[in-house]
Image (cartoon, helix red, strand yellow):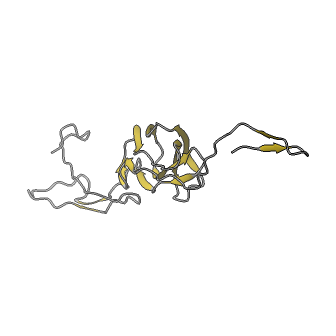
């Protein structure tokens, strides 16, 4: 674009020329790679969050923003981190028990923004409730070699109970359970 200045008698003078690119089309977000959607873990160590590069046919990618929230509405961020245009991931430590939703926002050079799909990540750091031992009674002596054990169900509101393992040992510290 340029400007032509014209005086009252018709003399003209051109300004310098500049280019202007109009882009109202948002970029296409890349796919979310890690962690996998719906992963359940108890690991509170470092966790890698990675995604593939976004695409924009009109301008270049200006940057990415990783957002992690405990609700899929993304209104109270646990993480809201800006990353450069060449950064396709970061490593974070999430330590609090809970459900985490994560997504990536991508912005192009014109300021158009797009949001990736959302994934969910479960961090379960709380053990289940203990089962109550029903029978045999404590300190009972028996001559039966096939003992039937009875217990109440344990409870885990977050990920549920996967299985039970009954341990027996002659040592109350369970140093060598069978």
- Number of marks: 0
Out of 42 and 115, give the one closest to the viewer: 115
The answer to whether residue 56 is left or right of residue 174 is right
Asked if residue 46 is positioned above or below residue 108 in the image, the reply reads above
Expressed as whole percent of the image width and height from the top left, the position of residue 97 reads: 46, 48
For the N terminus, give its image quadrant.
Answer: top right
Quarter residue 137 falls in? bottom left
| Quadrant (top left, top right, bottom left, bottom right) of the C terminus | top left
Does residue 139 appear left or right of residue 101 in this picture?
A: left
Taking the view exactly as shown, the residue that stands out farthest to the right is 8
Q: Nearer the viewer, residue 118 or 87?
A: 87
Q: Is residue 130 above or below residue 91?
A: below
Q: Is residue 146 left or right of residue 60?
A: left
Q: From the top left corner, tell me how far across and down residue 74 is, in percent.
A: 56, 55
Query: Looking at the image, which is closer to me, 146 or 15?
Result: 15
Horizontal side of 160 relative to 8 (left or right) equals left
x then y, percent, for residue 119: 43, 55
Question: In percent of the image, x 43 and y 40: which residue is there?
Answer: 88
Q: Residue at coordinates 57% horizontally, 44% vertically from top-left?
A: 109
- Looking at the image, which residue is at 42% across and 44% down? 53
In the rendered image of this protein, does residue 39 appear above or below residue 50? below
How far across and how far down the image is residue 150, in percent?
23, 62
């Amino acid at each position: 674009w340029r400007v032509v200045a014209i005086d009252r008698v018709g003399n003209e003078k051109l300004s310098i020329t500049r280019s202007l690119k109009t882009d109202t089309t948002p970029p296409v977000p890349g796919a979310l790679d890690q962690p996998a959607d719906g992963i359940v873990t108890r690991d509170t160590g470092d966790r890698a969050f990675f995604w593939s590069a976004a695409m924009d046919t009109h301008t270049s990618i200006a940057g990415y923003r990783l957002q992690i929230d405990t609700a899929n509405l993304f209104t109270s961020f646990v993480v809201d981190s800006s990353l450069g245009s060449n950064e396709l991931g970061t490593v974070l430590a999430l330590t609090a028990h809970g459900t985490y939703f994560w997504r990536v926002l991508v912005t192009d050079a014109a300021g158009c923004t797009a949001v990736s799909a959302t994934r969910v990540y479960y961090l379960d750091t709380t053990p289940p409730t203990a089962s109550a031992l029903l029978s045999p009674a404590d300190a009972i002596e028996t001559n039966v070699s096939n003992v039937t054990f009875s217990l109440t169900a344990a409870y885990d509101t977050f990920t549920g109970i996967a299985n039970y393992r009954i341990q027996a040992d002659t040592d109350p510290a369970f140093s060598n359970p069978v």
